[in-house]
Structures are given as C-alpha cells and as structure tokens.
Amino acid sequence: MTLANRRIPTDEFERIREEVLAQWPTGADVDFAEAVAYQRGLPASSRLADRLAAASREGTTLVQPRAGVALVDELIALLRYLEHEGEADLLPTTIDSYTRQNAYGDAEKGIHESRAEGRSMLNGFPAVNHGVRECRRVVEAVSVPVQVRHGTPDARLLAEISYAGGFSGFEGGGISYNIPYAKKAPLERTIADWQYVDRLTGLYEEQGISLDREPFGPLTGTLVPPCISHAVAVIEALLAAVQGVRHLTLGYGQCGNLVQDVAAIRSLRLVAEEYLDRYGFGDVHVSTVFHQWMGGFPQDEAKAFGVIGWGAASAALSGATKVIVKTPHEALGVPTKEANGQGLRATKQLVAMLRDQRMDETAAVREESDRIVAETRCLVDRAIALGEGDLAVGAVRAFEAGTLDVPFAPSRFNAGKVLPARDDRGAVRFLDPGALPFPKDLLDFHRACLEERARRERREVGFQMVIDDIYAIGKGRLVGRPR
Amino acid sequence: MTLANRRIPTDEFERIREEVLAQWPTGADVDFAEAVAYQRGLPASSRLADRLAAASREGTTLVQPRAGVALVDELIALLRYLEHEGEADLLPTTIDSYTRQNAYGDAEKGIHESRAEGRSMLNGFPAVNHGVRECRRVVEAVSVPVQVRHGTPDARLLAEISYAGGFSGFEGGGISYNIPYAKKAPLERTIADWQYVDRLTGLYEEQGISLDREPFGPLTGTLVPPCISHAVAVIEALLAAVQGVRHLTLGYGQCGNLVQDVAAIRSLRLVAEEYLDRYGFGDVHVSTVFHQWMGGFPQDEAKAFGVIGWGAASAALSGATKVIVKTPHEALGVPTKEANGQGLRATKQLVAMLRDQRMDETAAVREESDRIVAETRCLVDRAIALGEGDLAVGAVRAFEAGTLDVPFAPSRFNAGKVLPARDDRGAVRFLDPGALPFPKDLLDFHRACLEERARRERREVGFQMVIDDIYAIGKGRLVGRPR
Amino acid sequence: MAEAGQAREAPRVVLGVIGADVHAVGNRILAYSLRNAGIEVENLGVMVSQEEFIAAAVETAADAIWVSSLYGHGEIDCRGLRGRCTEAGIGRVLLYVGGNLVVGKTPFADVERRFRAMGFDRVYPPGTSPEAAVADLRRDLEARG
Amino acid sequence: MAEAGQAREAPRVVLGVIGADVHAVGNRILAYSLRNAGIEVENLGVMVSQEEFIAAAVETAADAIWVSSLYGHGEIDCRGLRGRCTEAGIGRVLLYVGGNLVVGKTPFADVERRFRAMGFDRVYPPGTSPEAAVADLRRDLEARG
Ligand code: B12
Ligand code: B12
C-alpha cells in the first residue's frame, strides 16, 4: 500500500479491519451494523456533534475536562462527579499511555495492579482492554456526550472499540498524534492509520451517525506558534474530509497573549473553512476548541487557578466552541476528581460571565489574525506543492523538508529546527524559523519582534530566551525575563 | 463652622485637634513632631507613596489584600503571612465596624471577647483602642508599606493614630466613607471631618512625609456606573488637594465588562488629572486602584477563583497601579489567612503574566472612556455650579438635588433614585438616571443599551433586571438573564 | 395581633439590618420580595438597634421580625433580643435571622445552633432565596393558626 | 571508568525519559544544562527502555544514569533497573530519577522512599532546577573519589 490522499476503498478497508479487530481479543466484539444501531439508539444528549452545533449557534463556549482512570466503575464515578459537581458540559475518557503504544499486555497488567493496589496505576482508561460492552456502561452512566482523548499513533482498534462502545467523539490525527506523541513512528504509517479512523468515522456518518473528529491542536503544548498548529489542523481536516468525516473540531493551545489567542481561534476557523471550501468540503461542520495553557504549570494551586482563569477568559473572549480545562494539580500529577471539578467550576464561572463579550473584531486582533492566515497558507500550500497534488504525501515530505516543524517534538521524523520565543508582549514568535517557507516580510516581522524584546532585556536574541520562556509560567510570568 | 472648600487654618485645626485627641484615651499619645520624626525614620520600603510611584514608572500592577483582626499579635502574624505566603506587594490593616462608628467602647468589648474566645470577634483591627505604640509594632513587623482601610465617616482620631502609628496610607473620604457606610451622618459633617484628615495629611507632607490618601472607589460595590464613582473620586481629590494632599490613589470597583473596566481606569486618571490641573494642582501624584468585583460572590471557592481571576486580568490589562484582591471565602465570611493568601497568589500570577499586555488604546475602549469622561464632567461641573464656586458646598447640594446619587446606598442623604442595570454585553448602564444632569444624547445611549438587552431577553426594561443582575455573579453569570 | 387569632389579610413583617451593619443591598431585595409575595413590610433599613426592631414590631403588631446581619458582628448584636421581645410583651413574635451571621467561614450547623439557642425560630445561611423564607413564614403562621 | 579512579576530564551522564513517556521538553533542557555545566551527556531522548539505558551506560562508561519519568508510570517502568545494572556489571553507577514519578499528586517524601527502595541514589520532585542536581552529582562523585 502506498500513501495517497484518497478515500480508502471498501474492500481494502474491510481487509485491514479484519487485521485490526484481531489485534486484541476484545476486537471480536465489534459488529458495525449492531454498533450503528446502538449509536442510533443513544439519546440526543449523548451526541457530541449535536451539542457542538448547538453551542456554535448559541455562541456559548462549552467546558470539558480531561480524565481517565484504570477501572470502569471508578471511571464512571469520576465522570459522574465531573458532570454533576464539576458542571462539565462535555465529558472525556482519557486513555492510558500503554494503550496509546498498543501495549495492551502492559495495560492488562496495569488493570490488575490497580485492582490489587486499590488506586489507579495507569494514567488513563485502557478502553481496548475493557472492550465494547464496558465502554457502553460508561457512556450510558452519564447524560452528556463523552469523547475519547488519547495520543495514540495507531488508534485503529481504539477507534473501533470507542465508536462501537458509544463514544461520540474521537481526538487525534495522523500528524498530531504522532509528532508530539511518538519517537519512531513513521508519518506515512500514522497518516495511513488515521485515514482508517477517519474512514471509519465516515462509514458511521453514511449511516446517519455523526461522530466528531478532533485533530489534537496543541501538539507539544509548549510555545507552538499558531500557524504551525493551524497548518497541521488544516491538513488533518482535509485528510479527514476526504474519508467522509463531516464534523470536525479544530484545536489550538493557548499561548497566553490575549490578542494572539483570540486571533488564533478566529483565524483557525477562517483558514480551515477556506481550504475545506476550496477542496469541495463546504458541508463539513467546523467547531473550535481552545486548550487552556498546555505547557508547564506553577505548582502552587492558587497560582494554577490564576493560569486556569486566564485560559477560561481567553477562551470565552475568543468565542471558541469549547474549552479544555486544566486543574490546580496540573504541575504535580493526574488530578483527583475534586481538583478536576475545581478547574471546571472556575472555568465555568468565567466562561458564563464572559459569554456576552467578544474580542475578535478589534484592529489588533484582525491584524494578527491576517498574519496567522498568511503564515498558515505558506505552510499548507508548500505541503500541497511538495505532494505534487497529494496532501497525504505532501505532509510527509513537508516534515522531511522541515517546512512543517513542531517545536520540542520527540519524533525523529520532525526536523526540530524551529525555535519559538515570546516577543515583548508575550506573543509566540519564531526565534529560529528553521526551514519554514516564509517570505522575507514575515521573517523580518518575527525577527523584529524578538529584537524589540532583546533591547528591552538588554541581552542578545538566543536560546536562553527559549529556556526562560519554558519556565516562565511555572515561575509566575509569561515572558521569561532575565533576573 | 460653615462648610467651605478652603484649607483649614492652623489655629482652627489645632482647636479641633484637641477635641479629637480627647475622644479616647489613646489620643493622648499622639505627638505630631515625634510622629513626623518616627515616620521619617521608617525605611523606604515602608512608604506607600514611593512604592506606588515606582510601580507607575515601571508599569506594574501591585497586589494588595484586605485583612484585619482584633488583636495585635494576631494581626502581625496575619500580615506577615500575607507578605510571605501571599506575596502581597502592599499590606492593609482593615478596621473593625465598631471603630468605624466611633464606638470605641464596643470595640474594647470586642477585644476582650476575642481574648476570651481565642478567635477574633471583631471584623477588623480596632486601631484607636490599641493606640500609637501598638500600631508601630504592626508597621515594623513587615517590610512592605501598610495602609489603613476602613469605612469610617468620622475618621479623624483614627487618622491621627494611624499616621502617628507609622501607617503610610489612609483610605476614605467625606463622601465615599459616608454614603455607602452610614445611614444618618450628614454630608456637611463628614466632608468637614475628612477635610481634617486631608489637612493632617497635608501637614505631614509639608514636613516631607508623603502619605497616600485613597478615596474609596467602589462605593456600594454593586453595579455602580463608572461616572458616579469617578465624579466622587474627582471631587474628593480636589477637596484633598486643597488641604495639601499630594499623593492620591483613585479607585474603581470592577463592573465585569472588560471594555468598560479598562476604559474606567483610563478615564479615571484622565479626568482626575484634568480637574486637578484646572484647579492648579498639577503637582499631585495620581495612582489608580482597581478593586476586584465588590458585589455578591459565588459561594463555591473554585467559582470564586474564577471571579478573582477575571478581576486580576482586568486590573492588569487596564494598567491600574494596584489591585485590591478578593478571596475564595468572600461570599461566606471574613477570610482565613490561607484563603486570603490564595486570592493573592492567584492574582499575583495573573498580574505578573499579563504585565506586558495592555488594552487601553483600542477603539472600543477609547469610545467608552470618552463617554465616561463626558458623563463625569456633567456630574462634577453640576456640583461645582450648585456650590456657586465652592465644591464642598456643591457636593452636599448635588446629593440633595440627586445630581450625585449612589445606587443602593444606605445613607438618608443619598437620593436613591438612580437604578443601574447591565446592557447586553454586561456593561453597567443607567436603567433609571434619576436626577443625574445628563444631556439627551447620553440618556438616549443608556436607554438604547437597555432596550437592546430587553429585546434579546424578550422582556421589558425594569426592576427585575436589576435584581437579576445583583444575583448574577453569585449564580455564575454576569448579565442576569431571565431563566 | 396574630396571637389573638384575628382574621388578617396579610402577614406583617418588620425588616432590618441589625447593629452597625450598613449592607443595604440584600435588605432592599428582601423588602421587594416580601411585598411582591403579598406581605406587609415595615422596612427599617440598615443600622437598626434591638430597641428599634421591638418598637416597630409592637407598633405594627408584627407577626415576625426578620433580622439581617452581614458584617460579622451578628452574634454580639443579636444577644438578648428574644428576652427584650418578651419584656415588651411580644414574646411569641417569630424571630428569623439571616445573612453572614458570624465572623469567618463557619459550618452552618454551628451557626444555626448558636442562634437557635439565642431564641431565633429560623436561621438562614447566606445565599438564601427570599422565596424559600417566605414559604417558611406562611408555614409557621399556619401552624400557629 | 570512574570506579577505577582514573583521572577524568568531565563526568559522564546517560540521560533519557523512561518507558512509553514522550515528554521531551524537560529532557531537552536537562541535556542543555548538563552540557553547559561541562558534563558529557549521552542523551537517549524519550521512550527509552531499561535495556537502552544500561547499554549506553556500559558503552560510555557513564558515572551516572539520569532517568526522567513524567507521565505517571514511573513506578512500573523503573522497577528492577538497579538489579539489571548490577547484572550488566555497572552496579555502582549513580542512579538519579526525577519528574512526576507516580500517578497523582502525592507527598514527595512517599515518592522518595519508594524510589530509594528501588535502588535510586537520588530522587527529584517536579520543578527541580538542573543546576541543583548537577551540584549533587559533583558532590556524589567527589565523595566516591
Ligand atoms: C507539556 C506536557 C505534555 C505534552 C508533551 C509534549 C512533549 N512531547 O514533550 C503533551 C501534551 C503531548 C503531553 C502528553 C501527556 N501527558 Co503531559 N504534561 C505536560 C506538562 C503540562 C508540562 C511538561 C513540561 O514540558 N514541563 C516543562 C519541563 C521543563 O519540566 P519537566 O518536564 O518537569 O522537567 C524538569 C524537571 O521535572 C526536572 N527533571 C525531570 N526529569 C528529571 C530527572 C532528573 C534526574 C533530574 C535531576 C531532574 C529531572 O528537570 C526538568 C528540567 O527543568 C506537564 C504538567 C506540568 N509540569 O505542568 C504534564 C504532565 C507531565 N503530563 C501528564 C500526562 C498524564 C500526560 C498524558 C499521559 C495524558 C494526557 N494528558 O494527554 C500524555 C502522555 C503521553 C506519553 N506517552 O508520555 C501528567 C503526568 C501525571 C502524573 N505523573 O501523575 C502531567 C503532570 C499533567 C497532569 N497533572 O496530569 N503532556
Ligand atoms: C457589597 C458588600 C459590601 C458593600 C456594602 C454596600 C452597602 N452599603 O450595601 C461595602 C463595600 C460598603 C461593604 C462594607 C463592609 N463589608 Co461587606 N460585603 C459586600 C458583599 C460583597 C456583598 C453583599 C451583598 O450585597 N450581597 C447581595 C445581597 C443580595 O445578598 P445578601 O446581602 O447576602 O442578602 C441576601 C441573603 O443573605 C438573604 N438574607 C439576608 N438577611 C436575611 C434575613 C432573613 C431573615 C432571611 C430569611 C434572609 C436573609 O437574603 C438576601 C437577599 O437575597 C459581601 C460578600 C458577598 N456576599 O459576596 C461582603 C461582606 C458581607 N462584607 C463583609 C465585611 C467584613 C464588610 C466590612 C466590615 C469590611 C470591609 N470589607 O470593608 C464593611 C462593613 C461595613 C458595615 N459597617 O457594615 C463580610 C462579612 C464577614 C463575615 N460575616 O464574616 C462579607 C461576607 C465579605 C467577606 N467575606 O469578608 N461590603
């Protein structure tokens, strides 16, 4: 099989499917027709795509946590708590790291150890090991939509079990769940594997079951300039649309400068719809998701609340369709349900208070937004060009060429040349643009931003700025000024 | 004595002073010359005016809590905690309610009961009862400036003891500590009593001791439109300047709409400096203080953190010189030191993160700011006109005429005709302007804002909106929409 | 008077904020809500002494006195109110109290116990909706007949 | 090898993030800081198995192995590492571990106890500054002579 951006033919899909479902015994319980019927029988309140569409219409920002534990009943208790005490509008099921590596054997050990120790020894929910029926218990136990969130390069079996298990949304993508989440997984492989997930989603869509697909916006969560995550989002959106996906939620991880963050959400929708339209996918529904600051957090819980509050406010002012919430435990460990509930309620309060305020049409925002669109077009168009018309191939070549390059990513297949740093107002700019194909005016702009900062700080533009910026929020600042 | 806006002559001041110092035995310990020498001997780090001036120059927003307990050693422990664990830049000493009513006998009982019960039975620190020497112990125990905060209509003795006791700032004013804090105290009386406080401040200033005077900006803390608190601030600033005050911090209580709040801080400085200049007080230093939401809070602590976060962010984005911090206990009771520290640290994190971002020059802010300035001028100029040139007299007559009118104030001398309500974006507008002397275009603007909201809510403009708005933040909203 | 069992059109409540307390907003809303619910209200506003509450209750033949205290001195301010009512011959008047009754965040059960011990018939935590208390009032008055 | 007491220009450290953990940012900074401090670093990056750590330590004659674990599975991933070092003939290599070592916010003293029991010489909480750990390393190496 060679990678190509075309819809996977049914026979080929079925052939792969057989292999996929055989990867772990629970795969045998997946029966597509039965699963479609099951999904159809779920109440409207469990459908993520519907809830997102309603929020878009009403102009509200929905609130969603991250959460997952090793055992089913514990997961149910956790999700119910987050729904009732946390006032979550949408629920997650976060998958553990062994499952993400398809190490179902290790996950099984984790389940047993968790039972033995009486505490979750896994950092998430091993949905594959638990299987379809147990997942359905989870979905039925709550009355809001539940989405699977993970970080799995090869998520084909997980998707099969999740959809058959009643989950109505699935995070990830061939680039966004590879480059930040893997070391050696080739992009050709993961893009192909996610074409499978998208095709599966499309098959449900064709049966009238709208499932929401959400590329992972924040990537490495650490000083990722908007145009890079936007370019990945646009490419994954187009790849998904080809496979028949019709409900997409595109994401962005907060950088911390309000103008840039509001501009990022505004431009994300604009540029995604532009490309979807251009390729004939005007019928795809696009929602946006704003992730509260995804990098290092302060350890003090009150300070963490400060960071959470700013994320909530920025999300609301940007008009994102939903916001993913951090917790006061972020710097230290997987949060307790109480800590998770606190992050949710703090966010809910702010999002509700700000629901009638918007920032997206000020001149500064429009200018920043226009620039992000221009940058994103450079990156996406170059990938298209490199693929000689095939975007899947183009994406692989773009990473090879470093014209797509994610800062701080662990993957070997990422050039790792790009270095970001904050400008004097905290917006994330390019300190080193690596091989990104920007015209001179854009390069000059970024350089000038950093030089302005350097002058203020009386030091040279350099890697120490990057280090200082990585530590900054944890130490109570946004821009890592020298001390 | 008849009220007039002229500097109190020395002999008259000394005559009153004798009476004042005789009001409670601790008054006898005040010796002005000795107090000046004591103040002069305090380290620079204890001087509020200096710290504020430095913050203005650096463009940072300082963080200050409210706090006060009945007993000295407990107060010292509390303030040290807030300095070290709360990272407060400035400290307060909040005075108890009996002292505020000059009920020093009741305060004495409260001190004894507090000793007996082993917990503070007073809602603040009875500084008059403790006297000069004990106050000095407080000021010396910490290494940042300490300001007295209260709500005392007749604060003459409190000011004498506070200044002699080493405090370097004093909140309040003849209007702002009467109308929201008293029922039957005549304005003539309280304005005259605060002329005394201001003259006392001026006497220190003439000896080279700069003490900061801060009119109480938020008034009743509940949906006060900016122009009303600005008008009071400007009048109190002018009255203070006449008495020789040279360091003023003017305040504003957050309304919750970002554009309005940023515009309020911007316009407060502009309009105050305009009037100070006009009356020949170009040498007065003006700082601004932003009070985090002063009305009813949500009971849930995580939600309270949300409100605090928004207050911190708005303060920072507005560029206020300092921010007064609420705590997660706000809705329930005087906070523990831990809760107070949490409010501080959450605020500190946000203020530091946002120190390089400003919002004050966007078009929407400038428009709102211009309108607030225009409204404030209407109110102040009418007071000046009513006083036939004497602003002290004019202020009294303006309240009589209702051309100055504070919503929800308990004072008999307040007309109580004005009703505020939020517009569709949460900015506070006039639902009923009472007798405020606004031209038609301004009245039309406010009316139109509320009608826009009414249309959206499919109900009439009316008092139910006011009630809904009063409850709204406590219930997790800003605009009190009908349910 | 209610105690005499006369037919009465509407219950009568004396309302006010006790002591040196100036929190006026809740008082304004309580008065509005009580009137809206068809109850006759004598609103004394803020900074009301025990004597003023009692005098007004005697004068209006009130069924209940609704005391608010927000600022934290409620415990000191409310002591002896029941006794003084009895002395004034209105010992059976319903005494309700609400607000932020003590200094500091305190478990409400403690607060309720303390104020019941002082002779209050009902004690309300902050955030009480006026409607709920009005319903209690009607119930209590009905129970008395 | 250090154990043999030879004169060495710079200490040598093998660095990596253990298990299925992909948190790359701290690793990048640790490598940079170690090099800045004049230490020779063999950085294995993320997703490093116990075997890879040991092979690299043997090959470079490392003085210390610095293991990071952020994602919460540190306890499972680190078990037996000391034993395998001994088997590989580098039983005396310094083992340092740091990051978010267990699932959930846990008192650090507990975490430290558990990892010391597994044979780690030093255990670091999240937020450790690389400089502090480098100072420890020099001290530990000096103590060994
Ligand atoms: C950024 C981030 C991510 C990014 C990582 C991108 C990348 N590839 O690097 C993304 C979004 C992909 C991610 C994914 C996940 N993450 Co993550 N992540 C973080 C976060 C926010 C910051 C980490 C970071 O970069 N910090 C900045 C660097 C400079 O600090 P550092 O990593 O702590 O390292 C420093 C020190 O710890 C120390 N140190 C570290 N190791 C060692 C070793 C020695 C010997 C010494 C001396 C010192 C030392 O020195 C380093 C440099 O100063 C943290 C929470 C936080 N800290 O705020 C969570 C966190 C580490 N992640 C967590 C989890 C659970 C996950 C996921 C499993 C689930 C999820 N939420 O999606 C996946 C895991 C995937 C996997 N297989 O590993 C948890 C771990 C929970 C726990 N231990 O209980 C955390 C703590 C968040 C939380 N509270 O839930 N994450
Ligand atoms: C606004 C406000 C002020 C304004 C008041 C303006 C004015 N004149 O009205 C200002 C700024 C002037 C002020 C001053 C002070 N305040 Co104040 N204030 C508040 C605040 C933020 C909101 C109060 C409010 O208006 N709520 C909205 C209304 C609708 O609700 P409510 O008052 O609670 O009333 C409702 C219910 O409680 C209930 N209810 C009330 N009474 C009764 C009685 C009965 C019988 C029933 C059935 C129901 C009922 O029904 C009401 C309507 O729904 C509260 C904290 C909070 N709640 O968030 C603090 C608070 C009440 N204040 C407090 C304090 C300490 C003070 C000061 C002493 C010190 C200071 N911080 O400056 C001074 C006191 C001055 C004095 N002598 O009274 C404390 C009290 C602490 C305690 N009890 O432990 C509080 C709780 C804040 C805190 N956590 O520290 N305050």
Image (cartoon, coloured by chain):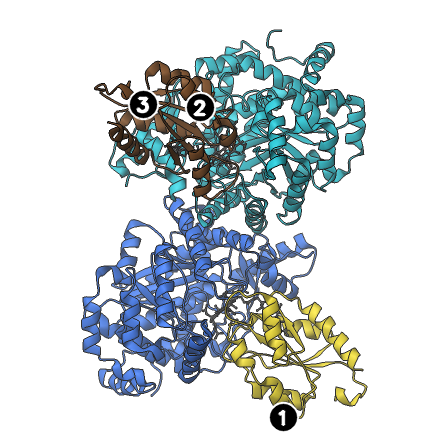
Chain colours: A cyan, B blue, C yellow, D brown
The Cα atoms of the two marked residues, 3 and 2, are separated by: 17 Å
- Report the front residue among C39 and D122: D122
Q: Which mark is residue D83?
A: 2
Residue A449 screen position, x and y as percent: 34, 32
Up/down of A237 relative to C52, above or below: above
Q: Are marks 2 and 1 in contact (CB under 8 Å)?
A: no
The Cα atoms of the two marked residues, 2 and 1, are separated by: 85 Å
Q: Do marks 3 and 2 share a subunit?
A: yes
Chain of the residue under the numbered disc 2 shown in the image: D
Residue B230 screen position, x and y as percent: 42, 64
- Report the front residue among D54 and A286: D54
The image quadrant that residue B211 belongs to is bottom left
Q: Which mark is residue D63?
A: 3
Helix, strand or loop at mark 2: helix
Chain of the residue under the numbered disc 3 shown in the image: D
Q: Do marks 1 and 3 share a subunit?
A: no
- Tell me the crowding category of disc 1: few under 14, some 14 to 19, or many 20 or more residues within 10 angstroms, Cα based: few
Q: Amino acid at mark 1?
A: Glu
Taking the image as shown, residue B444 lies to the left or right of residue B31, namely right
The residue pinned by badge 1 equals C87
